[in-house]
Image (cartoon, rainbow, N blue to C red):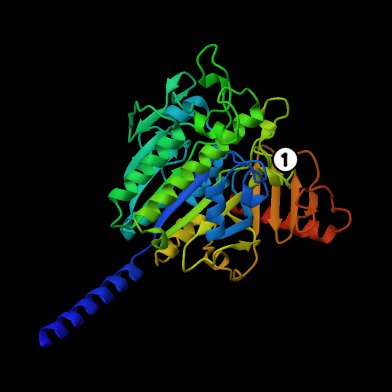
Amino acid sequence: MRNRGIMRIAGAFLLLTVALSAADRPPNILLITADNLGYGDLGCYGNRENLTPNIDRLAAQGVRLTDFYTAGATCTVSRAALLTGRYPQRIGLNHQLSVEENRRGIGLPHREKLIPQYLKPLGYATACFGKWNIGFAPGSRPTERGFDEFLGIRSGNADYYTHVYDGEHDLYRGVEPAYVSGYSTDLFAAAACEFMRRRQGGPFFVYLPFSAVHYPKARNKRPGEPNIWQAPPRFFFQYGYLPDTTDPKERYRAAVTALDAGVGRVLEQLDALDLASETLVFFYSDNGAFMSPGSGLEVASNAPLRGGGNTLWEGGIRVAAIARRPGRIPAGSVVGEPLISLDILPTLPAAAGARIPSAPQLDGRDMSRALEGRKSPSPRAMFWRYRGAEAVRSGRYKILRAAGDEPFRLFDLATDAAETKDLAAEKPQVLTRLQADFEKWLRDFNN
């Protein structure tokens, strides 16, 4: 009897030790980005045509952010800002990389510190699977910048099946070309799942920047091959479409649902490993969908926002974003506080219980309070400057100069998310205040 009592006590002590160690262990982190996905392309953001059950379920299990912004209106810029937590002006990368820069350019300066370099000292295994697009010269490649593993494309828009970018093979594993067959969304999701299985002892950080749903580019196709949205046949059948349909909207919907399936695959892997409760998942689009009437790109939706990618209208920089961390983030919640992709980097070490370093200077801030439904300690302004356009968001108001030779316009985003009514003449004091904030922000980079 005495031995049984001792065994019960020992067993209870072991269970308590395991529970405490799991509670003390930093969370796994799964950071997923979509490529050029529109604000209005998801069911949880009001779309009634596209089938996105997995991302919608993620929103139901976590928090949906209605006023989340990307720090860059185009792919390269947004990704560089995400990985550094610093404004494009501060890091010196505020343009979309050219073909040659994507392949062999430095891109993001080597002096910059990336998310995995903050997490590895905390014991994280790190990996990137998907679109890089910030330079691939020696020293610039993912496995040279803090990632233990990489499978993905160097550039921004390789063919989904052949993995060709402007006539050259673009899929790499580590620093070497990878000749793997398959649809890129499936390949990247499978690689992420396999990495999580191997590293389930944790903690791990998976950066999963899907190249979907980037629009097709003729320069990535063989002569005579149609320049159309691509997806496996099963996603066309889900809509009742034939896989050889030539309707751009039908093809785009299939590509969106294929992306959703990729997201679902990695979430299901977390469930299968019993890691969902120990993992912080963050999903967002790198920028808004591109709107170019007459080119077939207007099949995406940024509704109810104005404009699209490459612009500083809301449709270019306000993006769909969702976070989930069971036990910390209330399920089914919605947060309207203005947040920005610069906030992701400082949030991740904080989630692991680490202090945010004072250097290098970060431009975002820990958004854990907002994600958990608590107000941030103080309001702040967010700034953009890209290709002659300039913008500031502060509270409910936004000023925008769409081109360098025109005056700022003022919008009340709380009542006019579509930016239809210029209030500059009606609220000159607000306009003056935000202009002064913008000038002060610019001076910060000139000192």
Visible in this render: residue 242? yes
426 is higher (above) or lower (below) than 153:
below
Visible in this render: residue 92? no
- For the N terminus, the quadrant is bottom left
Q: Which residue lies furthest to the right in this view?
A: 426
Q: How crowded is mark 1: few (under 14 residues within 10 Å), some or many (20 or more)?
A: many
355 is higher (above) or lower (below) than 221:
below
Residue 270 in percent (x, y) is at 39, 54
Q: Residue at x 65, y 66 (%)?
A: 379
| Circle count | 1
Q: Quadrant of residue 227?
A: top right
Residue 44 in percent (x, y) is at 62, 52
345 and 106: which one is in front?
A: 345
Direction from residue 286 to residue 348 in the image, left or right = left
Residue 421 in percent (x, y) is at 84, 50
Direction from residue 61 to residue 306 in the image, left or right = right
The residue indicated by pointer 1 is: 307
Q: In which quarter of the image is residue 353?
A: bottom left
287 and 392: which one is in front?
A: 287
Q: Which residue is drawn at 62% across and 69% down?
A: 378
- Amino acid type, label 1: Gly
